[in-house]
Amino acid sequence: MRWARLAALAAVLTLLGAAAAAGSGSKASLPRPSRTPAGASAGAMHEAGIHKIKHIVVIMQENRSFDDYFGTYPHADGIPGLGGHAGKVPCLPDPGHKCVRPFHDRHDLNHGGPHDTAPAIADINHGKMNGFVKEQVHGRPTATGDVMGYHTKKEIPNYWTYAKDFVLQDHMFQPNLSWSLPAHLALVSLWSAFCPDTHPMSCRNALSKPGRPPHWGHKPQAKKPPIYAWTDLTYLLHKHHVSWGFYIFKGTEPACESNLTASCNPVTNGPISSPSWNPLKYFTDVKHDHQLSNIKSLNGFFGAVRKGKLPQVSWVVPSQPVSEHPPAKVSPGQTYVTGLINTIMQSPEWKSTAIFLAWDDWGGFYDNMRPPHVDENGYGLRVPALVISPYAKKGYIDHQTLSFDAYAKFIEDDFMHAQRLNPKTDGRPDRRPTVRERVHKLGNLFNDFNFNQNPRSPVILPVHPKTDFKEP
């Protein structure tokens, strides 16, 4: 049954595209903030202002839907009928019961649901957005109804404070309709593919089953590493002499989930980042460019920030305990992320940095908004996303349609004269179906900044904020 559903993917995505054209989900009844940047015209501001950003840090967490974290946030496109949002509170079918409605979940540990391509199609259910409970019952029967829970400021006060003080993006969609590995591949390369050899043109679209890294999964087995031969963003970074770092947990890392300091030190033994969250080391162009050493321990990130030597582009991925990926708890992840952001804010790098914080996929949790259709790969479901910077607008809600492709677009605009990962122009052709930065539905992160304003002061938050979690 699972593979039959996957075989029907193309037809279903086409139907979703038609449905998306008719509308984009429920809308908030409260007035929205202005979408127009203050000051000069967008074009003039872009030329004069974007280059004030000398460092871009992408912090990628795991497996949360937008409605799970911000479904009741004021003015955002959240859960219908809750938090002042228009519409009737949804009631999703539950096998053996009438239905399950969204509820305030005060548990630190959440279970979520299946979150590969087939469950995503079932969750969306031709735009009805009502398959989440059925999928959880089918895939994780001991956690029935958990996917309909949502958190509020009481459980995730720091994330809500970042939204209040900086920018919340309420139309950020996972770039592909799939699970973590394809999402992380899309984060660094805007595509997910399978390659039989090291020639870029040998790679073929692989929405759900790209080559998997060794030691991945519940029963990992040693095997040959995958071949990721298509072009990733670091190829352009290297070509344009833009410094970058990809920071992971290598096993001797800060114990951020328990440490009381703002910088999450000292170094301790601990778990490594999941291989599926660390794909860059398998890209052939990274090897050919002799840049494998740019994949570093998280300790290197803290050191670079403190010394004022942060690369121009950084990606930071977690270990399982601080990832917020079920069964990891929410609070250790919030502590870890707060420690990262505090460290940047307390450094000389803050005044020229943009932090993009997001979660890689929806984790099976309920979201009310059907994804737009841009090609055979996605978009996927909606995820939480924030922009934190001294030039970010205060309390701004960005309603543009976005995906992680917008991060690449901003990086390219800032550091590479708007060069795109385009097989016709980037000098390393591959068979990617779409130049994702040029999708007409994709918004521009520039709208989240006001480069005419005085740089914002840091907002240093407690790494262990008071929360209202309850134990099971």
Image (cartoon, grey):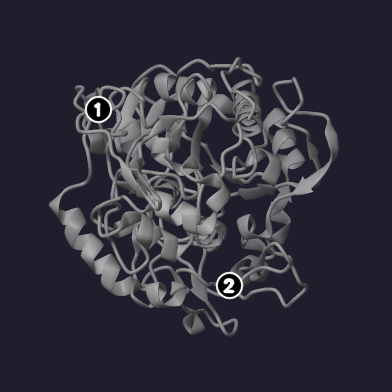
Of the two numbered discs 1 and 2 on the same chain, state the one appearing first in sequence.
Answer: 1
* Front-lying residue, 85 or 348: 85
Residue 179 at x, y = what percent?
Answer: 51, 59
Residue annotated with mark 1: 85
* Front-lying residue, 31 or 199: 31
Identify the residue at image location x=55%, y=53%.
Answer: 140
Residue type, label 1: His
Position of 240 with respect to 127 (left or right) is right
Residue 317 in sight here: yes
Where is the C terminus found, in terms of image quarters? top right
Identify the residue at image location x=83%, y=29%.
Answer: 266
The image quadrant that residue 277 belongs to is: bottom right
Residue 171 at x, y = what percent?
Answer: 32, 41
Residue 319 at x, y = what percent?
Answer: 69, 45
Pointer 1 local density, CA inside 10 Å: few below 14, some 14–19, many at least 20: many
Cα distance between the residues tagged 1 and 2: 43 Å
Where is the N terminus found, in terms of image quarters? bottom left
Does residue 239 sit above or below 460 in this rendering? below
Q: Which of the numbered marks, if any, corresponds to residue 228? A: 2
Position of 442 with respect to 389 (left or right) is left
Image mark count: 2
Position of 303 with respect to 143 (left or right) is right
* Front-lying residue, 99 or 329: 99
Mark 1 or 2: in front is 1
Residue type, label 2: Tyr
